[in-house]
Amino acid sequence: MKDLGLLFLRISSAILMMTHGLPKFQKLISGNFEFGDPIGIGAAPSLFLAVLGEFIFPILVIIGFKTRWATVPPIITMMVAAVIVHGADPFNVKEKAVLFLVAFISILMLGPGKYSLDKK
């Protein structure tokens, strides 16, 4: 059951994260680079990094490819969201970012389980 639990955690967390990353990905490919600049690197690079963390790397987490490494960009993205973007907001506003952060840190620590490309 442990491996099925890890599979469920990987797939559900990554799919839910991708629902937030897909609009950003669509914005990026349409050429609209209007986005916040929470870490001072510019709107376009910030959008690109958010797309990586919320859309591209979660795909790798779903299939279980380089899973531990693939959790790092979503973890960093959610740290920025929770601490910088929503740092002054009440907890209920930053709660979603914290929940994603906890889920991806758990995947990093536990690994992908046997139902993954990493274990094939």
Image (cartoon, rainbow, N blue to C red):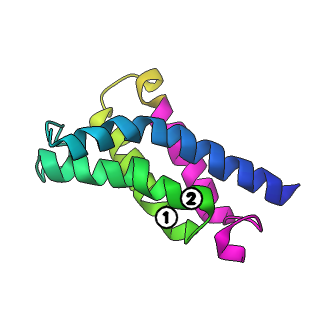
| Segment colored magenta | 96-120
The residue depicted at 35 percent of the width and 40 percent of the height is 81
Q: Amino acid at mark 2?
A: Val
Read off the residue under disc 2.
Answer: 61
Circle 2 residues within 10 Å: few <14, some 14–19, many ≥20 = many
Residue at 63 percent of width and 55 percent of height:
106
Does the stretch in magenta take in 113? yes
Q: Residue 36 bears which disc, if any?
A: none
Q: Position of residue 55 (x, y in %)?
A: 42, 49
The local secondary structure at tag 1 comes to helix
Q: Residue 29's spot in the image, x, y percent?
A: 23, 46
Main SS of residues in magenta: helix
- The residue labelled by disc 1 is 70
- In the image, is 108 to the left or to the right of 74? right
Figure quadrant of residue 97: top left
Asked which secondary structure carries label 2, the reply is helix
